[in-house]
Image (tube, rainbow, N blue to C red):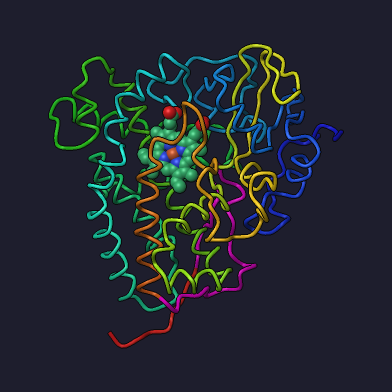
């Protein structure tokens, strides 16, 4: 049996930019539910096997309750208080709540995120995509794909859905990035949270007074929700709604450019796109690490987890488990990747997954069609990876293409 990891989670991608760190893969091979020691000295667990992750996420005995800081990882953030028991809940952040609070808040949103509602938005999402690609085509290459396309696309979509002014993106994009940066001191992360939260508190207060035709106004019409809850929900939706998909578009384009045969197939046959999107979601698993807190003594895949333990899951490790996917470290757009756990599992499974899929199909589809000669403008080894961030991706992706007469 392997020993506990002495120094927390390895973050460097020593097996290539798209694969789990080698130490994580070794753990999954030897002990898929494994003890680990956090830098503050307390022992917790890390779950890396596909079946073990699924079982753990389905078990509500593993609580999601966290204090504000838990959207950060305590073992990586200097100044973070140690977690020994659930801290008071931050209003509205239902990703960090258990039933019945979680159920009450999530239920208010499920109607707005059904597949049918998302399909109604598809045309608008395609319009936004094409408009951004028109603008990119007018620029002289090379351009940074993240700034020109990957970040604006989901930001524009979620702003329109929520009723947030896109002109205010400077505030929410910068503060989100600071909030998710594991290497920033805790107080700076919290300051970013508070600034964004303050902005959203003002916004939902205005919407409660004068509701409009948008999702936050619809929420503000629920008298049962306090302003603090509304602001927390707005924070969660705005953050999850732009940062995740943006990273998928940036990192996914990098992965496709590094797999030119797969890219050529996609270019030749757009019917392959939906399957390719799910394979990219599996392969990249950008929202990798999540954690829970054992609210009782629980046996998980033969290991005894004591009440009070912090338990991490690595969705990336699970999605690269060879017991579930053949040749998991290979990007294969023909495989049946649906069933991956990139959107989590159980009661917290991603609320925005249909929206994300539609944005990714529009985004990758449009990009491949409009820029068939797209390539990296710098060597692949120089692409800056977001190993410091809660959500993985690329910081920038300089790309170029052969200009064709319009
Ligand atoms: C939850 C991943 C896009 C909204 C989650 C969870 C994961 C995830 C893994 C579960 C967290 C947990 O169990 O603790 C992703 C990925 C995305 C994406 C990989 C894009 C590629 C979106 C979008 C939205 C969204 C576009 C839109 C607003 C949410 C919300 C939750 C959530 C509200 C909390 C659900 C709950 O606690 O019940 N997401 N997400 N996500 N996601 Fe996403």
* Residue closer to the observer: 264 or 205: 264
Residues drawn in magenta: 372-397
Q: Position of residue 130 (x, y in %)?
A: 28, 65
Q: Position of residue 46 (x, y in %)?
A: 70, 32
Q: Where does the C terminus fall, quadrant-wise? A: bottom left
* Residue closer to the observer: 190 or 37: 37
Examine the rendering and report whether any part of residue 61 can be seen: yes
Q: Is residue 228 magenta?
A: no
Which residue, as the protein is rendered here, is positioned at the far bottom?
A: 405
Could you tell me what secondary structure mostly forms the magenta stretch? loop
Total of numbered circles in the picture?
0
The image quarter containing residue 142 is bottom left
Tell me the quadrant of ligand 1.
top left
Q: Position of residue 49 (x, y in %)?
A: 68, 37
Q: Residue at x 33, y 21 (%)?
A: 228
* Residue closer to the observer: 31 or 149: 31
Examine the rendering and report whether any part of residue 176 can be seen: no
Q: Is residue 372 left or right of residue 209?
A: right
Q: Position of residue 260 (x, y in %)?
A: 55, 73
Q: Residue at x 55, y 56 (%)?
A: 335
Residue 235 vertical position relative to residue 23 in the rendered view, above or below = above
Q: Residue at x 31, y 41 (%)?
A: 115
Q: Is residue 55 left or right of residue 174?
A: right
Q: Where does the N terminus fall, quadrant-wise? A: top right
* Residue closer to the observer: 205 or 245: 245
Q: Is residue 385 magenta?
A: yes
């Amino acid at each position: 049996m392997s020993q506990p990891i002495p120094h927390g989670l390895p973050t460097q991608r020593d097996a290539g930019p798209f694969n789990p760190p080698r130490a994580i893969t070794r753990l999954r091979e030897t002990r898929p539910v494994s003890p680990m020691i956090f830098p503050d000295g307390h022992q917790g667990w890390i779950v890396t096997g596909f079946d073990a992750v699924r079982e753990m996420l389905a078990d509500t005995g593993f609580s999601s309750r966290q204090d504000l800081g838990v959207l950060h990882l305590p073992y990586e953030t200097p100044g973070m208080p140690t977690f020994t028991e659930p801290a008071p809940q931050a209003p509205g952040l239902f990703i960090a709540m258990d039933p019945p609070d979680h159920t009450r808040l999530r239920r208010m949103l499920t109607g707005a995120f059904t597949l049918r509602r998302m399909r109604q938005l598809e045309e608008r999402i395609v319009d936004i995509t094409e408009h951004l690609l028109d603008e990119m085509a007018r620029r002289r290459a090379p351009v940074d794909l993240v700034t020109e396309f990957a970040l604006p696309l989901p930001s524009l979509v979620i702003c329109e859905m929520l009723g947030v002014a896109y002109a205010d993106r400077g505030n929410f994009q910068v503060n989100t990035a600071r909030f998710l940066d594991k290497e920033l001191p805790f107080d700076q992360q919290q300051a970013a949270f508070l600034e964004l939260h303050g902005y959203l508190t003002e916004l939902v207060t205005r919407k409660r007074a004068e509701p409009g035709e948008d999702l936050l106004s619809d929420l503000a019409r629920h008298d049962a929700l306090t302003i603090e809850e509304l602001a927390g929900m707005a924070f969660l939706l705005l953050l999850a709604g732009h940062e995740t998909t943006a990273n998928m578009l940036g990192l996914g384009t990098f992965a496709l450019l590094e797999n030119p045969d797969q890219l050529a197939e996609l270019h030749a046959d757009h019917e392959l796109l939906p399957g390719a999107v799910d394979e990219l979601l599996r392969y990249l698993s950008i929202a990798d690490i999540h954690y829970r807190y054992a609210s009782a003594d629980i046996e998980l895949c033969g290991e005894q987890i004591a009440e009070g333990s912090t338990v991490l899951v690595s969705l990336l490790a699970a999605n690269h488990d060879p017991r579930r996917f053949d040749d998991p470290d290979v990007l294969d757009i023909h495989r049946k990747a649906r069933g991956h756990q990139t959107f989590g599992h159980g009661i917290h499974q991603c609320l925005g997954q249909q929206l994300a899929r539609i944005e990714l199909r529009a985004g990758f589809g449009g990009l491949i069609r409009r820029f068939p000669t797209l390539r990296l403008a710098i060597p692949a080894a120089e692409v800056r990876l977001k190993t410091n961030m809660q959500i993985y991706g690329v910081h920038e992706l300089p790309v170029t293409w052969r200009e064709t007469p319009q």
